[in-house]
């Protein structure tokens, strides 16, 4: 699938949407190639297990494609906070982020970003991406009520938050 991504990057620089859902053979090489499509607004890497340990390819994608609005990284277990940070810093128009099954948002990586706990990384996402409409945080077990407050305060267009499997959220925060 890297060859397809390379062709898309080479011959379709104005591409705005690409869906690699369950393309197991896509690797960071293909992601780097698709970063040549600088007008990308939607990208789906869900279940692209070859991208589970992305190296610098996601950083390149985020810096090359600041118009991204939808980012799907379902089941990419190796994604860390440092992989999300470039999207937070560069893609201010993000509307939809799907992190279903991303389990490696860690305190250690958050500390390297200058924040103290994983929730602070989410706070950075909320403050940096006010256009956010949909957020999927399924099975992110460390999420607390206070981690949702920045989204409630900063993301006025937020329509949907999926917290399936998140055990520490109260009913009160869900009703705000």
Image (cartoon, rainbow, N blue to C red):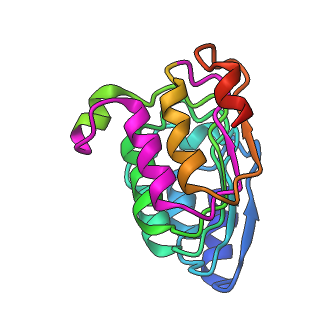
Q: Residue at x 60, y 46 (%)?
A: 152
> In the displayed structure, does residue 26 sit left or right of residue 79?
right
Residue 138 location (% of width, % of height): 68, 28
Seen in the picture, residue 24 relative to 86 is either above or below; the reply is above
Residue 79 location (% of width, % of height): 48, 38
Residue reaching furthest to the top = 167
Closest to the observer, 139 or 5: 139
Q: Quadrant of the C terminus?
A: top right
Q: Is residue 17 magenta?
A: no
Closest to the observer, 166 or 149: 149
Seen in the picture, residue 9 relative to 119 is either above or below; the reply is below
- Quarter where residue 174 is shown: top right
Q: Does the magenta stretch include residue 123?
A: yes
Residue 97 location (% of width, % of height): 64, 50
Q: Which residue is drawn at 64% across and 74% down?
A: 40
Image mark count: 0
Q: Which residue is drawn at 40% across and 52% down?
A: 85
Residue 66 location (% of width, % of height): 51, 74
Q: Which residue is drawn at 51% across and 68% down?
A: 92
- Residue bounds of the magenta highlight: 112-141
Q: In which quarter of the image is the N terminus?
A: bottom right
């Amino acid at each position: 699938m890297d060859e397809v991504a390379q062709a898309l990057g080479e011959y379709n620089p104005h591409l705005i949407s690409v869906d690699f859902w369950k393309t197991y053979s896509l690797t960071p090489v293909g992601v780097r190639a698709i970063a040549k499509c600088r007008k990308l607004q939607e990208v789906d890497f869900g279940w692209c297990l070859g991208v589970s340990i992305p190296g610098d390819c996601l950083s390149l994608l985020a810096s090359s494609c600041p118009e991204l609005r939808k980012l799907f990284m379902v089941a990419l277990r190796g994604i860390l906070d440092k992989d999300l940070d470039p999207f937070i810093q560069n893609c201010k128009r993000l509307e939809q982020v799907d992190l279903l099954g991303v389990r490696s948002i860690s305190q250690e990586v958050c500390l390297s970003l200058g924040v103290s706990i994983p929730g602070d990384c989410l706070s950075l996402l909320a403050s940096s991406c006010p256009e956010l409409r949909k957020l999927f945080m399924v099975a992110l077990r460390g999420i607390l009520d206070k981690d949702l407050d920045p989204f409630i305060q900063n993301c006025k267009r937020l329509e949907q938050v999926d917290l399936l499997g998140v055990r520490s959220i109260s009913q009160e925060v869900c009703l705000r």
